[in-house]
Amino acid sequence: MQEKIEKVKEAVKKSQEIEDMKKSLILEKIEEWKHEDEAMSLIPEKLMELAAEIKPILKEIGLI
């Protein structure tokens, strides 16, 4: 799962569809959540709540 989370982070950083402010928020939340074991399984769901634009990234990586 950690490897997929790192892929999500890289894809978010490179995304042209996600605003810079949202990128910062998304990356901050990923860092926060990845240290909580229970949160790891909730990351895809929580990220989609933050930004609908992230859904294609999560699908591409296989998290949804």
Image (cartoon, rainbow, N blue to C red):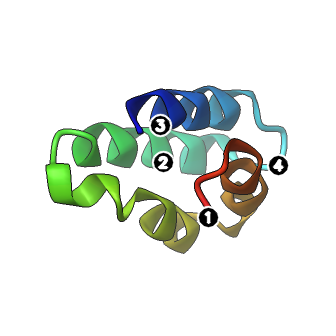
Q: Residue at x 64, y 40 (%)?
A: 20
Give me the residue at 26% from left, 49% from top: 33
Which image quadrant: the N terminus?
A: top left
How many other residues sit within 10 Å of disc 2, few (<14), some (14-19) or many (≥20)?
many
Q: CA distance from mark 3 to mark 1?
A: 16 Å
Q: Earlier in the sequence, mark 4 or mark 1?
A: 4
- What is the distance, in whole Å, between disc 4 and disc 1 at their CAs? 10 Å
Give the distance between the C-alpha atoms of the residues marked 2 and 4, in whole angstroms: 13 Å
Q: Amino acid at mark 3?
A: Ile
Secondary structure under badge 3?
Answer: helix
> Mark 3 packing: few (<14 Cα in 10 Å), some, or many (20+)?
some
Q: Position of residue 15 (x, y in %)?
A: 77, 37
Q: Earlier in the sequence, mark 2 or mark 4?
A: 4
Dot 4 alpha-carbon crowd within 10 angstroms: few under 14, some 14 to 19, many 20 or more = few
Up-down relation of residue 9 to residue 28 (above or below): above
Query: Circle 2 is placed at which residue position?
Result: 26
Of residue 39 and residue 26, the one placed in the foreground of this image is 39
Query: Where is mark 3, residue-wise?
Result: 5
Of mark 4 and mark 3, the one earlier in the sequence is 3
Report the front residue among 9 and 25: 9
Find residue 48 and report its horizontal and vertical position in percent: 57, 68
Give whichever of discs 3 and 1 has the lower sequence position: 3
Q: Is residue 56 left or right of residue 28?
A: right
Q: Which residue is mark 4?
A: 17
Q: Which of the two marks, 3 or 1, is nearer to us in this view?
A: 3
Which image quarter holds the C terminus? Answer: bottom right
